[in-house]
Image (spheres, coloured by chain):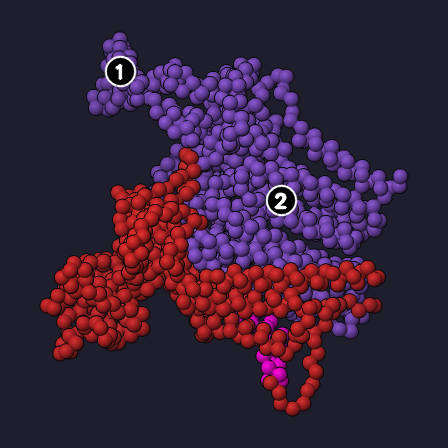
């Protein structure tokens, strides 16, 4: 009988035992191919579960729990969401309404990515010689590190905002889809408002009973309740989560609009099924006078309540809203147009003509924004994102992106592709040579 | 000439003759209606131009659960005939058994007899039974309208009643679009809509004349009607009269429209003429009417988008993928026999037949690109067809190099498998649909879908080769050292290739996303699926480089690569409708599961100790 379980053509490098302490020896365990394999397996698990988790949670939550974090929280029972689809509704635990989470700590995307970069770098220091034969591998692995870095830059420094305009409307600010702020407003007399905003994350992080003080804010904040999402994800999109307060019902709000209406905690909008809808955060906050420490009242705020509410007697108003970024220029929607495939309601094209006015540059120009054809202006890129022409006014929405690392993936992918091509070509040449010799 | 040469030539020559015979357009029949000419009529449906034949095929396919033909008496008739029968309202059109009802619950609900095998029922039967259960059916419809979750039974009832409604809509000529809208010629109106646009001017007259004739009747037959009035009571009687009046008005309106259609919509009138000739059983009139229609309304379209539909008609009739499917079976069988009995002639024949299939397949792909003016991959159907094509090229190439029949076998297997998957997906509707604006063709997008699909393909090829390795080794003594080594080499080479393709394809998807909404990577399920394939392949390569796996381990990993690929290709779509999720079907979920289980079964076999492998026998190799 012959031996049948053949070993691969390129045997693994056998480590040469060396004596004494050296930097190299320190790096050896970090450079191990076994570590590489483990990291790949961890990535597979992370990506698979991070995909399943999107059935329940918003993309932001999933990014925070799985991909854009050092320590992740992996929901083992997300496997039930898999079996529910593929095994005729079978679940290990929980129901569709109450999915039951079994969260275990798991290395997050940042950690795995960093380890991969370290593993690769160490491998090159320890194992790979800088020769022409290895050129492809060098390029390829350098590209992988750059690619990981690019995603890290995007996760931490890219900003994605929105701008929504009715036809004819002029926009002065962008708003975020995933960040909120508590804005304190006071008229300055010249028609504009003085704005002091407290990031919503601070309020969320403080949690019930927590305190938030901000040097510029006119009031101190004590969190009574923070609500991640106040809108029922199963209700129709135009449905609001606002409900009237029942007669005699317990109510934590003592002032403002919260005495009449209430908002409750709902499940999150699923990244997969939410159809672009987002969580509507809300909170019950007790605002206190900064000098006396006396409470002014407990208010209900929410992104579903847009109108600022008057606070105390000092002329301040406050609104909890999607975080705004004011622009040094204005964007006006000149025309908003949706084109359908003939005889159907299927959209063929979305087009918006906008006018950009930049007073500082004394610039005023028109630009056409359509699918796959964004407007690049002043470091931001405006992409056609949403459009509603069914209502009384035509409304267009732009995704506005600012990403300092937007070119990194292109560089990375060029390196990797060149590397792979070079490597496979070199191998092919070797292979053909060997064959010719035989 | 020796047998080695002439056998392949003869076999392939025969197959080529069959292909050409199918491609040559048939001459018009000497007697009977010229259905081909009728099927070539261009229409507008779901936002694109297509021959009427395509509309007929799609609807019959959907309604009859996967057949493009129907049985009338002893004859098998094409879809276009069914469409013509229904449109013209010919006697007996409602009795063709075309509605397939698979659900036993629905059959019981409608008290339909069991027809094992076909499970097909006529619109007449089904609508009669549905009417009897109308209260229950209405309840289900309301539930669906309010977006309440539906049980499988309720979904099946809705599907069945939907089929009946579709047939009624065909009968009323409510679709497809046939006549350019006078106000907006880019949109074609259905004959029904063309009538609707103009019925206002005849409505008053129809109402008046119907009322007059009714009054006349009430007056003339006053004596007899008095008895009825007394029996029903005055209120019920008045209601009944009103009902009759409505019916008479409707009938009169149709008559008036038929009379005057020539004036307000001459093209629609010409179409009605065709239908009438058919309903009256006058084939010579039918053929003349169709010919006239073509001369007047179709010939002037030459050179426009609507004029290109004749190409699609050719594709429909030629049905190249059906031909390919059988050629792939041939390739597979020939390669398999070659292993068993040997003889290079057999394998040469397999290669030659594979090349012929490849030519037909390539031609069909090119035609589809020309007809749809889209890159080769736009939806699940086209991805299946494309994967089959890429797989065949790769496998034929492998076999031309190794000459051991394995490439041919796997190529035939993948070709046949993807053709079957495509046939199954065809039942979901148009295979060249218009896409949402966000998927509008863009350079990166075209490259992305093409390459990532080829990446899926290569991973599948590696996986199938690995299955051959495992099954051959386990069940037969054919896995000799030589063959085993070359198989391992093939799996490894294809995996390298798969890594390259899937990586570049995935990255191009990122470029597209960045170009479209400024986000290179969105962690969308479909993107994650693609990256899983990349990582899986990379993992497999590194396992080999690290010496952790050898041939068997590598093969096991490659088989699991099939699982990952199926997850990315079909599985992620089932999680819910995301941006990329271009298909949803309950049956697909079950199909995925069955496929995964089969792959796990192969892996389980492969994990059995080597002493149980037939190829390794009692003396296991030193190293496992």
Q: With A309 as the anchor, is B398 left or right in this view?
A: right
Q: With A435 as the anchor, is B230 left or right in this view?
A: left
Q: Which residues are magenta?
A: A24-43
Find numbered disc 2 in the image and state the secondary structure of the residue it sits on: helix
Give me the chain letter of mark 1: B
Of residues A248 and B468, the one nearer the viewer is: B468
The crowd level at tag 1 (other Cα within 10 Å; few <14, some 14-19, many 20+) is some
Residue at 45% in and 74% down: A70
Dominant secondary structure (helix, strand or loop) of the stretch shown in magenta: helix
Residue named by callout 2? B419
Residue B517 occupies quadrant: bottom left
Can you tell which of label 2 and label 1 is closer to the viewer?
A: 2
First reached walking from the N terminus: tag 2 or tag 1: 1
User: Is residue A33 one of those drawn in magenta?
Assistant: yes
Residue named by callout 1? B208
Image coords of residue A159 (percent x, y) = 38, 63
Residue at 69% in and 85% down: A17
Q: Give the quadrant of the C terminus of chain B.
A: bottom right
How far is the residue under mark 2 from the one under mark 1? 59 Å
User: Is residue B65 one of those drawn in magenta?
Assistant: no
Judged from this view, the residue extending furthest toward the right is B1
Of residues B89 and A363, the one nearer the viewer is: A363
Image coords of residue A266 (percent x, y) = 31, 62
């Amino acid at each position: 009988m012959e031996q049948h379980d053949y070993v691969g053509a390129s045997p693994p490098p056998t480590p040469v035992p060396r004596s004494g302490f050296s930097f190299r020896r320190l790096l050896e365990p970090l450079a191990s191919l076994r570590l590489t394999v483990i990291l790949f397996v961890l990535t597979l698990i992370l990506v698979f579960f991070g995909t399943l988790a999107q059935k329940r949670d918003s993309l932001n939550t999933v990014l925070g729990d799985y991909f854009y974090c050092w320590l992740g929280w992996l929901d083992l029972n997300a496997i039930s969401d898999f079996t529910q689809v593929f095994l005729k509704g079978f679940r290990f635990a929980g129901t569709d309404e109450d999915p039951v989470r079994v969260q275990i700590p798991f290395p997050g995307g940042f950690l795995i990515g960093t380890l991969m970069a370290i593993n690769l770098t160490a491998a090159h220091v320890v194992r790979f010689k800088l020769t022409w034969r290895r050129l492809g591998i060098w390029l390829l692995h350098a590209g992988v590190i750059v690619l990981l870095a690019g995603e890290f830059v995007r996760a931490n420094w890219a900003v994605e905002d929105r701008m929504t305009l009715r036809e004819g409307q002029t926009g002065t600010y962008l708003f975020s889809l995933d960040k909120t702020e508590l804005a304190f407003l006071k008229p300055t007399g010249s028609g504009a408002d003085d704005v002091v905003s407290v990031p919503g994350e601070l309020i969320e992080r403080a949690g019930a009973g927590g305190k938030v003080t901000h040097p510029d804010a006119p009031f101190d904040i004590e969190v009574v309740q923070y609500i991640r999402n106040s809108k029922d994800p199963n209700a129709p999109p135009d449905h609001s989560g606002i409900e009237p307060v029942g007669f005699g019902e317990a109510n934590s709000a003592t002032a403002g609009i919260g005495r009449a209406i209430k908002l409750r905690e709902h499940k999150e909008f699923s990244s997969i099924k939410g159809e672009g809808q987002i969580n509507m955060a809300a909170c019950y906050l007790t605002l206190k006078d900064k000098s006396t420490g006396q409470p002014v009242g407990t208010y209900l705020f929410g992104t579903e309540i847009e109108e600022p509410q008057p606070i105390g007697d000092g002329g301040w108003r406050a609104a909890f809203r999607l975080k705004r970024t004011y622009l040094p220029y204005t964007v006006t929607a000149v025309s908003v147009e949706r084109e359908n495939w003939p005889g159907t309601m299927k959209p063929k094209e979305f087009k918006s003509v906008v006018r950009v006015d930049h007073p500082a540059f004394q610039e005023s120009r028109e630009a056409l924004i359509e699918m796959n054809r964004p407007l690049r202006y002043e470091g931001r890129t405006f992409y056609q994102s949403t459009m509603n022409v069914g209502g009384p006014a035509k409304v267009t929405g732009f995704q506005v992106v600012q990403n300092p690392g937007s070119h990194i993936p292109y560089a990375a992918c060029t390196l990797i592709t060149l590397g792979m091509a070079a490597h496979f070509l070199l191998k092919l040449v070797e292979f053909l040579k060997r064959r010719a010799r035989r | 000439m020796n047998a080695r040469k002439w056998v392949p030539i003869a076999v392939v020559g025969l197959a080529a003759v069959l292909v050409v015979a199918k491609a040559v357009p048939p001459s018009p029949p000497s007697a009977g209606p010229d259905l081909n000419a009728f099927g070539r009529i261009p229409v507008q449906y779901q936002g694109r131009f297509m021959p009427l034949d395509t509309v007929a095929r799609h609807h019959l396919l959907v309604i009859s659960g996967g057949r493009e033909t129907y049985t009338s008496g002893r004859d098998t008739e094409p879809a276009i005939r069914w469409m013509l029968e229904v449109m013209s309202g010919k006697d007996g059109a409602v009795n063709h058994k075309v509605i397939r009802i698979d659900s036993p619950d629905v059959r019981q609900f409608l008290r339909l007899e069991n027809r094992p095998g076909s499970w097909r029922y006529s619109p007449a039967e089904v609508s009669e039974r549905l009417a009897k259960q109308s209260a229950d059916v209405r309840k289900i419809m309301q539930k669906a309208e309010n977006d309440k979750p539906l049980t499988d039974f309720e979904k099946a009832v809705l599907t069945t009643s939907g089929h009946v409604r579709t047939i009624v809509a065909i009968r009323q000529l409510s679709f497809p679009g046939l006549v350019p809208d006078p106000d907006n010629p880019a949109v074609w109106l259905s004959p029904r809509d063309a009538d609707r646009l103009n019925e206002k001017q005849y409505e008053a007259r129809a109402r008046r004349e119907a009322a007059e004739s009714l009054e006349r009747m009430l007056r003339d037959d006053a004596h007899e009607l008095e008895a009825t009035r007394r029996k029903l009571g005055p209120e019920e009687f008045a209601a009944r009269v009103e009902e009759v009046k409505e019916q008479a008005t409707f009938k009169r309106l149709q008559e008036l429209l038929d009379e005057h259609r020539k004036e307000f919509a001459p093209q629609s009138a010409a179409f009605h003429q065709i239908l009438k000739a058919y309903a009256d059983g006058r084939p010579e009139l039918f053929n003349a009417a169709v010919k006239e229609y073509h001369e007047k309304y179709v010939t002037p379209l030459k050179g426009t988008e609507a004029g290109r539909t004749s190409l699609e008609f050719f594709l429909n009739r030629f049905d190249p993928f059906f031909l390919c499917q059988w050629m792939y079976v041939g390739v597979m069988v020939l390669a398999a026999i070659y292993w068993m009995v040997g003889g290079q002639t057999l394998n040469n024949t397999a290669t030659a037949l594979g090349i012929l299939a490849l030519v037909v397949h390539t031609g069909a792909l090119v035609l589809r690109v020309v007809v749809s003016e889209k890159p080769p991959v736009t939806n699940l159907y086209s991805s299946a067809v494309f994967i089959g094509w890429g797989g065949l090229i790769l496998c034929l190439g492998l076999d031309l190099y190794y000459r051991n029949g394995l490439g041919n076998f796997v190529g035939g297997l993948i070709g046949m498998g993807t053709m079957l998957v495509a046939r199954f997906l065809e039942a979901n509707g148009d295979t060249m649909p218009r896409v949402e604006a966000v998927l509008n063709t863009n350079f990166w997008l075209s490259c992305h879908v093409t390459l990532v699909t080829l990446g899926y393909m290569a991973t599948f090829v590696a996986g199938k080769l690995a299955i051959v390795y495992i099954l051959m080794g386990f069940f037969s003594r054919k896995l000799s050292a030589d063959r085993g080594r070359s198989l391992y080499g093939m799996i490894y080479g294809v995996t390298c290739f798969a890594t390259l393709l899937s990586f570049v394809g995935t990255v191009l998807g990122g470029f597209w996303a960045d170009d479209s909404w400024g986000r290179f990577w969105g962690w969308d399920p479909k993107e994650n699926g693609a990256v899983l394939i990349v990582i899986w392949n990379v993992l497999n390569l590194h396992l080999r480089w690290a010496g952790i796996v050898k041939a068997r381990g590598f093969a096991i990993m490659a088989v699991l690569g099939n699982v990952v690929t199926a997850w990315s290709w079909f599985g992620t779509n089932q999680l819910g409708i995301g941006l990329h999720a271009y298909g949803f079907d309950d049956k697909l979920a079950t199909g995925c599961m069955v496929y995964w289980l089969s792959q796990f079964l192969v892996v389980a076999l492969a994990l059995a100790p080597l002493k149980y492998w037939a190829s390794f026998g009692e003396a296991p190799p030193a190293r496992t």
